[in-house]
Structures are given as structure tokens and as C-alpha cells.
Image: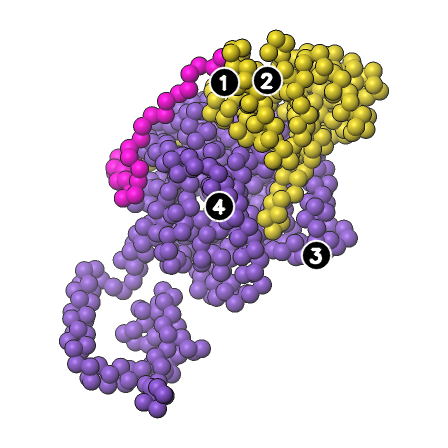
Chain colours: A purple, B yellow
Amino acid sequence: MAAAKPVPVPDFLETSRKGVADADLRRKLENSTGRHLDHVAHMRAEFPEYDGERDVARRIKEDAIGRLDELLIELKQKLEANGCSVFVAADAAEARDYILKVARKAGAQRVVKGKSMTTEEIDLNPALEEAGMKVVETDLGEYIVQLRKERPSHIITPAIHLSKEDIGQLFADRLGIEYSAEPEVLTAAARERLRSIFLGADLGITGVNFAIAETGSLVLIENEGNGRLTSTLPETFIAVMGIEKVIPKLADLSHFLEILARTGTGQKLTTYTNFISGPRRDGELDGPRAMHVVIMDNGRSAMLADPVMREALYCLRCGACLNVCPVYRRIGGHAYNSPYPGPIGSIVSPNLFGSAAAKLPFASTLCGACRDICPVKIDIPRILLHLRWKENVAESPVKWPRDARRARAGVRRFARFAQHPRTLRLFSAIGGLMLRPFAHDGYLRRMPGPFKNWTRWGRDFPAPGARRKPADKA
Amino acid sequence: MSAFHKMIATVKSALEGAPHAPAPHAPPPFAPVVAAPAARPVVPRAQHTRRTELTAQFARELEAVGGVFLGAFAPDDVRARVVALARELNARTAAIGAGVTLDADPIARALEHAGVRVVQPGAISGGGTDDATRAAYREHLANCDLGIAEAEAGIAATGTLAVVGAPNRPNSLTLLPPTNLIIVNADRMWPDLAAAVNAIGAATFTSKRVALITGPSRTADIEKMIVLGVHGPKKLYALVVWPHGA
């Protein structure tokens, strides 16, 4: 298998600096995330039950994840009874290989995809393309980033890093239409282009929002209708889901739908909520002849085994935590180098992609805005701290608890110093002078010798100023 | 051991190895959600006012998401309104699925009488569903001006129509045509999502395709600005059937 796991580029510091420096990007992000937050604030104001519904949704997830083994058995059984082929993938490679096998067997040439973060996670498109298939993303935002050969920069708004002018230019260049920055004109152009691709496609692939164990139905939530088309028109349909998407009962679903769109997009309900429970039945005029469901672990059972990490599996992928995150809003999604950016990405990615994403938990100010907006109240800051701790214990030269003792002793020594202002001032002045050669633009980004661990994880330190002379004070 | 059993074993050992420690902020332990009472197909007459309220709320919510509410009509008046809509839209071709509470045939005849070419998937699938039939049907739908279907249920709180697929009422009827008319019976109007899902029932979700449709297809992928009509219908009309004696 040639296509590798999507390896996030290790140097998050560098990519995030690039994001911070891009004033244009920040303006676009502020623009779009601001608009989203207005919608959500409005929705919450007119839906007083919101907070109570969040608790209910969280409880259902706690229950479901707490007996995931039973529910997966029930789901597989029901899906198969409904006529689906179910494949269980332990990791990304197994999932990709199975999808490729199905695609080849069906003789698929033209593949349409609904929006799916899980297939981004396993880097499916390059694998299909390498096998000679033409793969087209059909969600408007995904279509835009695919034309630019980029990754989505947001879980639900893939092209959030682009302005309407950028997209107008892209369409003029790539689709050969006249330049326009009107969203209506651009959307119409994409509709026309994609409609004929839909009608000619022989394989459809989408993700899954919820899988109901009771009925064996996959629930696909969307606004555009591309998910419905992808799962209805091609002769073969493959749905890819993580193991955590299963919920017990049909009656549970409405509790999630009540809050998901409200938080994700500021709607009461998305335009389409599709229940797909099997291939075309006798006498039906549409729907796929064959339906496959790929249920994937890929690091999720390890999250399950960690009691602090576990609640990250409750995530509904609504994308709201990205929009409120002060870090995401400054650096944008691409800086994270993971299909899952933002606060939720920072806690999920290290578990899915290992050491390559291990620094992401440090990309947070721990302000807690993500926890406050989360529709299932995931305590993201708590998990970030947990992951930081794990990362530092595992990888840093700090030996636990020997170094904890040392640190305490150091603080005690400092306390003695601090009781003698004159000595303290003298040593601070000397220390400041010694550090000056290492400062750039007023910041210490890499400190030397015994201090290097301070800046190692990206904690920039303001350069110590020259000691003020009494004359300066006036 | 199969891959599936291996995964179940992994999940099981993960669960057993780490008994769930609720986060400090977690709400109190799970209380089972009480199921709503069994669905009644017909709203009792005493609930006439309730039905009027629900229909009014449905209309408001539908318009809020960009749909058009045509009004409530007695079963015998539906035909005339559908023909009038086809005229307003200058529709030359239409497709109409079998009804849920309403007979679609008289509507189809009335449309044909008005000069609209009508395809009824019920008539097609009666003659078998080989590849050629399905391709011809899809071709027709992709090029037709108006798709008409009756919903299984309506949801007042969100302006939503629940459409259930069937051989004579295919899913692409509410997906491919640029304009949709969805009819719903006032007796099948429910206050909220939970009630509607419960009324449709788990058996239907298991055996059929269900789509909850809330307004015309839309996107906000360009600068979070809302545009209607991406992949699905650009225009959505809804009409409520008001049964006799109600």
C-alpha cells in the first residue's frame, strides 16, 4: 500500500507562525467564524432548553460509549439483516484496502464523495486516484479545496480560509467561467458541473453522523443534498464510520439533532437528515445495488481505554469549538497539519496520528471557550492538560519524580533570593544581559543551556529589558 | 477469530481496563429516556385547534428556511392548486409519486389535462426495474421541471417534511428536480422531531429510506453566506391537505 498515513508535519510552531503572520487569513477567519457565532448566539437565545438538551445528549453518549461492544454487535447484525456488507477495519490501511477492493470489484471509474472527515483521516482520495479512479468531492467547500489541491481547513466549512474573491478567481481559472465573486453565481456553476458528474458516477462514498443500533440505520446530516445524491445515485455505495458513531435507539437521535445543527451552523435542523438502512430493495427505482459499511477503529479503542481521553469519543464533529477558539481563529486550520484542526483536533489527532501530532495539545491557551460551546460538554482543556502531561512524561528529559523534587528545591532557593531585593536585582540584571544575545524581535524563542526546556514547547519568553536607569523613569 | 470479534474484544478490554470515571463537570448518571406514547395515526377531532396551530407554526418555520407555503386545502381542491402551481412555474414536465393519504392519479390526470407531461414512477416500477427502466426514469427526473411527493409526516417546530421512499415514491423525486412540491396531511403534523420520528416508527426506518427535508437545498460554504439550491431542489413548495370534517 503506497499511500501513507497522513503524517502531520511535525513543526507546528513554524506553520502556526505562518498563520499568525497572515493578516489576510485572519480577516477571512474573523469574518466567517464571527458570522457563525452570531447565528449560534441567536439560536441559543430562542431555545431555552438548549442547556438541558446538552446534558441529555451527553448522557446518551456516556451510556453508548460505556457499552460500545454490545452496541457494535447489535449494529452489525441489523445492518447485515438490512442487506449491507459490514467490514471492520482495525486501522486506516485496512479500511483503505477494503474500499479499494470493493471499488475495483465494482469496476468503479468515477467516484463521488460526500463530505467525510473519516475518509480524510485515512487519506482515501490519493489511494483511489493511484488506482486510476477519478475522485470528485461534491460538498461545495470540499470541491473548492479539492480544486486547489488543499486539505479542508475546517471540519464543517472546508474552505473557511478563502474569501469569495479567492473562490471566484479559482473557478475562473479552473472551470473556465467568467470571474464573479457572487456566492450565488459560484454555487450555480458548481451545481451545474457536479450534477453531470453525479449522474455518471458509479461509486459513492460518504461518512456517517450517527449509526442507530436498534434499526440498523445510518444517519447522514447535510444541507446541500450532495450526501443524498452520493448515497442514492451510484450503483455502489460505501459509508465509512468510526466505532464511536453508534447510538442505541432511534428515540435517542432527536436529542442530538436538537442541538447539533443549532451549535454547528445556527440552524434548527439541517436541510437534509437522511436515514439509510440498506441497498435498493425489490421494485425500487433508485438507491445503490450494493451497500458497504466500513466500521473503523484506527486508534479509537486506545482512547476508550484512557478514562480521561474517553469523552473525546462523544464528539459530534459540529465544528463549533474551532470557531470559538482564539488559537484557531489566529492561525487557521492548515497550521494544525491534521484533518482534525482546532481544539477537538488537538485532543484527537495525537491519538490518531501518534507522535507527529503530539505537540498539538500545546496549541491552546486553555481559555475554556471550546468546553463552553461543546454540545456534549466535552472538557477539552482537561484533556489537553492530560495529553501535555503524558507527552512531557514520556518524551521530555524530565525524570519523574526526581525532577519534581529538583524543581521544588529550585523554587525554595529562589524564595530565599527574593527576600533580598538588592541581590535579586543584581542577579536579574546580570541574567538579563546574558540572555540578550539570544533575543529576536523582543522575544526569546530558544533559550540556551539549562533553560532550553522552557522554550522547547513553544513558550516564547519576552526578552528581559535593559535595566531602567532612574533618568528613564521621569 | 474474525476481525470483528477481534475488535469487539479490543473494545471490551478497553472498557473493562478503564472503568469510566465521569469528568468533574459531568451531569448526573444516565437516566433512560422515556419513550413517547405510541403513535396515533389520526388526531382526534377535539384537537382541531391544535392542528390549526401546528399547521400555522409549520408554515412560519418553512418560510423561515426559504420554503414556500401554499396553504391548506380540502382533498378535492388539491388538484386545482397543483395545476395552478404548474402554470405559475411554466412547468412542462412533472413527476408525481404515489400518495400516502391522497390518490395521486387524479392529480396526474389534471396536470396532463393542463398540458404537462407527467411521469408516475408507480406505473414504471410495475413493469419491472431493469437497468434501462431505471436509467430512463432518472433521465426524466433530472430533466423534469417539478417533482411532487406526499410526505409521511410534517414537523411544526422546524418546518420539516419527512419523506419515506417506496417503489412508487422514489427518493430522487425529492432530490433531482429543480423544484419540489411536497404535500402533507394535516393529521400527520407533529409538534416536534421526537414525536414525528416516533409516529413514523422504527419498523419504517429499518425497512425504508427516510429523509427529513427542511427547506430547499442550501450551503454556507462561501464565507458562511447562505445560498439556496446547491445540489438538491432550489425551490420547495409545501401544501397541507385538510381532511373533510376537520
Q: Residue furthest front?
A: B49
Q: Position of residue A426 (x, y in %)?
A: 24, 85
**Decide: marks 1, 4 in contact (CB < 8 A)?**
no
Query: Which of label 1 and label 4 is nearer to you?
Result: 4
Say few, some or many: other residues with alpha carbon within 10 Å of mark 2 (under 14 / 14 to 19 / 20 or more).
Answer: many
In this view, which residue lies farthest toward the top?
B245
**Does the magenta run of residues contain A109?**
no
- Circle 2 chain: B
Amino acid type shown at disc 2: Ala
At mark 3, the secondary structure is helix
Which sits in the foreground, B71 or B197? B71
CA separation in Å, label 1 and label 4: 32 Å
Q: CA distance from mark 2 to mark 4?
A: 33 Å
Query: Which one is earlier in the sequence, the residue at label 1 or at label 2?
Result: 2
Pick whichever, A291 or A329, lies toward us.
A329
For label 2, the residue is B186
Provide residue B63's location: percent of width, then percent of height: 63, 33
Please rate how many residues cluster around mark 1, counting C-alpha atoms within 10 Å: few if below 14, some from 14 to 19, many from 20: many
Question: x and y percent of residue A376 in the render?
Answer: 39, 40
> Residue sitting at 33 percent across and 76 percent down?
A448
Q: Which residues are magenta?
A: B14-40
Residue occupied by mark 3: A169
Q: Residue furthest right?
A: B115
Label of residue B199 in the image: 1
Tag 1, which secondary structure?
helix
Task: Say which residue label 4 marks.
Answer: A41
Amino acid type indicated by mark 3: Gln
